[in-house]
């Protein structure tokens, strides 16, 4: 029997935000029998944010026929599904089902993370939806319980809940926080025209690795020890010198124009440039904010990117905000 809902202080809607993620290190193992890959990654949360509002809808009943609407706005919104396949909707449905709650809930998403850009915008939506729904329905679930549910939705969702900097293993969902890695990092984000889907990029990596027997074996990311050591101090150059992404060759194979973007960042003076996750967003790591502004200006002027943004990290994970217009917490 579904239980009654008593929302905190009579709340009818709750808004939460969650950050984009980047992978400072992304080591990808060989394809497993279950179709997944073992990952060794260092996540960092950066201040590009997804905002999700979950609201109670008047009326009785639950289930797909009576679920509230999903509305998406912001850059790239037209690419985001608005049915129950939407990852935020799946998060709401999962939490509602686990809690045995009979309530109609609508979802409003404001995009701030590039869509299909390798920065986990959909996972951030799910993380924010979990936090907002937990608060709205007064469930009082702790972070451990929410992270367990998050892992069922996708490999990046637990990290978008947690934020900061963390070592990820398994499929990326097993997290160990790197609490000492707090020095601020300034990053230029170059957005490409079009997107790359994660499954397609992984499949291309498998194909390229299969060609290794013909003498084209790809290098692998290797150990994270040097990177973790550099993150422990205020050493932007040391961090930049130890960044790695095994998916980058596959992203470049599928979208060769990204090579021009990476070249533009290097010529603009960035410490290091790389593809973000599965791409096609490119990241340029800088020594300080002033350098980041200069790199962003030069990359933008070359016309190799659809849009160029400045960001920084690490920042906090998913959290409720009282005013949808307020700035998310760091």
Image: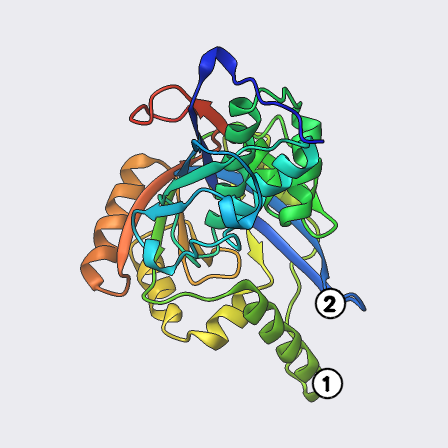
Circle 1/circle 2 CB separation < 8 Å: no
Taking the spot 50% from the left edge, 42% from the top edge, the residue there is 124
* Residue 119 location (% of width, % of height): 47, 50
Taking the spot 46% from the left edge, 57% from the top edge, the residue there is 274
* Residue 84 location (% of width, % of height): 52, 52
Label 1: which secondary element: helix
Judged from this view, the residue extending furthest toward the left is 301
- Residue 260 falls left or right of residue 136: left
Judged from this view, the residue extending furthest toward the bottom is 214
Label 2: which secondary element: loop
* Residue 60 location (% of width, % of height): 51, 34
Mark 1 is surrounded, within 10 Å at the Cα level, by few (under 14), some (14 to 19) or many (20 or more) other residues, namely: few
Using the image as rendered, state which of residue 218 and residue 100 is in the foreground: 100
Q: Tell me if residue 112 comes above or below residue 246 in the rendering.
A: above
State the mark number for residue 318.
Answer: none
Q: Which of the 4 image quarters holds residue 108?
A: top left
Taking the spot 47% from the left edge, 11% from the top edge, the residue there is 9
Using the image as rendered, state which of residue 316 and residue 11 is in the foreground: 11
* Residue 261 location (% of width, % of height): 34, 64
State the mark number for residue 35.
Answer: 2
Check the picture and name the quadrant holding the C terminus.
Answer: top left
Q: Name which of mark 1 and mark 2 comes first in the sequence.
A: 2
Examine the rendering and report whether any part of residue 282 can be seen: yes
Mark 2 is surrounded, within 10 Å at the Cα level, by few (under 14), some (14 to 19) or many (20 or more) other residues, namely: few
Check the picture and name the quadrant holding the N terminus.
Answer: top right
- Residue 126 falls left or right of residue 82: right
Q: Tell me if residue 208 comes above or below residue 99 in the rendering.
A: below
Q: What residue did someone put label 1 on?
A: 213
């Amino acid at each position: 029997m579904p239980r009654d809902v008593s929302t905190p202080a009579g709340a009818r809607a709750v808004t939460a935000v969650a950050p984009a993620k980047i992978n400072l290190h992304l080591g990808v193992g060989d394809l497993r029998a279950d179709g997944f890959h073992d990952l060794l990654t260092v996540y960092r949360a950066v201040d590009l944010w997804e905002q999700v509002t979950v609201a109670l809808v008047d009326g009785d009943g639950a289930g797909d026929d009576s679920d509230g609407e999903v509305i998406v706005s912001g850059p790239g919104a037209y690419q985001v599904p608005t049915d129950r396949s939407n990852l935020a909707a799946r998060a709401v449905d999962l939490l509602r089902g686990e809690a045995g709650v009979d309530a109609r809930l609508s979802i409003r998403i404001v995009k701030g993370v590039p869509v299909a850009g390798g920065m986990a915008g959909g996972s951030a939506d799910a993380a924010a939806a979990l936090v907002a729904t937990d608060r709205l329905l007064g469930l009082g679930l702790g972070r451990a319980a929410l992270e367990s549910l998050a892992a069922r939705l996708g490999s990046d969702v637990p990290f978008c809940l947690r934020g900061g900097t963390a070592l990820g293993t398994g499929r990326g969902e097993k997290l160990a926080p790197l609490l000492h890695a707090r020095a601020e990092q300034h990053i230029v984000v170059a957005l490409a025209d079009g997107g790359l889907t994660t499954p397609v990029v992984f499949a291309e990596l498998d194909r390229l690795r299969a060609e290794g027997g013909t003498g084209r074996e790809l290098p692998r990311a290797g150990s994270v020890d040097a990177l973790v050591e550099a993150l422990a101090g205020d050493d932007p150059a040391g961090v930049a010198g130890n960044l790695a992404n095994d998916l980058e060759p596959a992203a470049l194979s599928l979208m060769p124009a990204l090579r021009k973007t990476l070249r533009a960042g290097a010529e603009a003076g960035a410490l290091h440039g790389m593809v973000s996750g599965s791409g096609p967003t490119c990241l340029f790591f800088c020594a300080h904010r002033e350098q980041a502004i200069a790199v962003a200006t030069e990359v933008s002027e070359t016309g190799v990117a659809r849009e160029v943004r400045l960001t920084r990290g690490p920042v906090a994970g998913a959290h409720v905000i009282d005013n949808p217009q307020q700035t998310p917490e760091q």
